[in-house]
Amino acid sequence: MGDRAVPDASPVLEFHDVRMHFGGVTALKGVSSRIPKGIIQSVIGPNGAGKTTLLNCISGLLTPSSGSVVFRGEAVQGKPPHEIARRGLSRTFQHVALFPRMSVWENVMVGRHARTRAGFWAAGFRLPFMRAEERRIREDAERWLEFVGLHPEKDLPAGALPLGKQKILEIARALATDPVLILLDEPAGGLNTRETEELGDLLKKIQAKGVTVVLVEHDMNLVMDISDRVLVLHFGQVLACGSPSEIKDNPEVIQAYLGEDWAEAGGGLTGNSLSGDREDTPC
Amino acid sequence: MSSREKTAFVGLTVFLAVFPWVSALSRSFSHYVDVMIFAGIFSLVTIGLSLLMGFAGQISLAQAAFFGIGAYGSGILTGHFHWNPWAAMLAGVCVAAAVAWVVGVPALRLKGHYLAMATLGFGVIVHIVMNEEVDWTGGPSGLGGIPGIRLAGRKISGDAAWFYLVWAFVLAAFLFSRHVLHSRVGRALRAIHDDEKAAEAMGVPVSSLKVQVFVYSAVLAAVAGSLYAHYVSFLSPGSFDLMWSIRFVLMVVFGGMQSLWGALVGTVLLTFVGNEWLQVFADFEILVYGGILLVMALFVPQGLVVWMDAFFRRRSRLQPTPSDGGS
């Protein structure tokens, strides 16, 4: 459905006919898409449309009931999350999932786990290679903290940061795993307007590094501003897929959204933006 | 190491170095060396358990069983087969590690406190084997005639020599564990404790790391058991039952799970209390331990060491600004 909206180089992630049942409830009813390398792909849809379930199926927290998830040419469905992370897929969580009792710096250092190798023995005996590696872990983590602008807070416990900064820290931790693709589950949830703008800039910076971004988000201004492509989920199915302007023009999408109680979903796509007052997003 | 911790570590080493000399000065203190040898042996067990409980967030009720595997391994191999004690220790450690791996892999793949249940059952089985395999273990009447240990051609004899040997093992295990905790492995363990799902998504192989820590705790317990066997030269199953596993857990909780210092302090204090004052309670001893656990859980949930650390920090911070309040 509309998959060829963007000229399709070899996709970094594809999923075919992904279905997910929880007992009698079907959260995903056969979702397919191909995500080209290097784009910002948004996934939108009303609450309960299956967006987070889709992310969980991709990152390995859930195993799809049927269908396949292919990441960098390899089927990854059913693999444990830490192996998928090692292959270059990282993520953040809708409800912040930091390590609250560890420092900001240490949180990002954990992100380096899959790219380093000192084990029990090397660590216990402080072998020279382990000490060199430990130094690199600290430096790499500091670099990512500078990249997202959290360096001044590096020694605070992660749980002591305000929500906005916790969300940014989660992104830094995910970036520290050297991802090829990063899944962000509502990173703007709970952020104010200025913070959301900064987040948009950060996502652009991440894309500029060559990382593919898959963004689940309710904030329509953010989605329409930065996405190269938007996938709309509705009741566990793909309703539409295309560029932001195509999505805004799509009568089915408009109907689905205006039919729902759209106000509570974060409120970007209200009268104003639908009537097309901005040049880059004509509706 | 932070400077505070360095000071504490140097202080501990000096304290241990002079302890046998000082306690030899007075007749009423001289048996404290013996108590401290036991405290050291138990500390090896609780240091491993502290990593497992305080950092990986898993409870094991089989540490006495691993302690027993090390002890009986040494006792049987040196007693029946005349092995070199160090080789016997190594063999006991290997058996304990293999057994821990077999118990841990299925139990730790599941979320929740399955390890506690699996180890509870496993500990009971080991205890039954010790009682029933009379030909090997001597059964309820015990296993005697375990030879002493030689180090660099000299027999370890006398309380002072044993004291230094045991506490050298403890300090080595302490430093090793501390280095592990301050590495990528330790950070991953703390991450698991805080949020398993997030740790896994960041590339931490959660179940495999938990198994590694569990095996490590079993290895330390087996080393302790082997030292115990050679020190007391007589083993009976009563020293390796569920009650002892619970005591080890209690020692860790008492001192504080979030710090290796807590394991040391809790073990030494409870070993002294158990040896000096609780003997009179006989079978009611378990009530006293239950009471201690209850009071700790209600009033000092983070354990003695963390609580005292916070107390002194608060005091030193409060002195310049007494109006600061305590939040």
Image (cartoon, coloured by chain):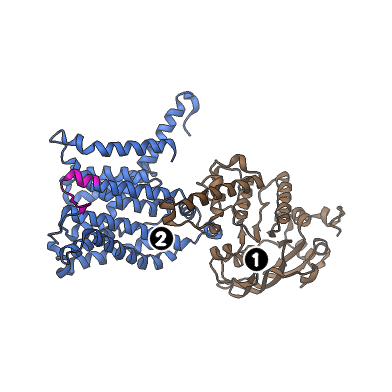
Chain colours: A brown, B blue
The residue labelled by disc 2 is: B212
Helix, strand or loop at disc 1?
Answer: loop
Question: How far from the left and from the top, in percent, is residue A79?
Answer: 55, 69
Type of amino acid at the residue the image marks with label 1: Gly
Q: Residues within 10 Å of mark 2 (few under 14, many from 20)?
A: some
Q: Which residues are magenta?
A: B150-164
The residue at 29%/36% (across/down) is B14
Residue A29 occupies which quadrant of the picture? bottom right
Residue A50: give its label.
1
Question: How far from the left and from the top, in percent, is residue A4?
Answer: 79, 71
Question: How far from the left and from the top, in percent, is residue B62?
Answer: 30, 60
Type of amino acid at the residue the image marks with label 2: Gln
Q: Are marks 1 and 2 on the same chain?
A: no
Q: Nearer the viewer, mark 1 or mark 2?
A: 2
The residue at 32%/38% (across/down) is B12
Instruction: Report the label total.
Output: 2
Residue A216 occupies which quadrant of the picture? bottom right
In front: A22, or B110? Answer: B110
Residue B2 versus residue A36 in the image, above or below: above
The residue at 45%/48% (across/down) is B182
Looking at the image, residue B231 sits to the left or right of residue A117; the answer is: left
In front: A41, or B136? Answer: B136
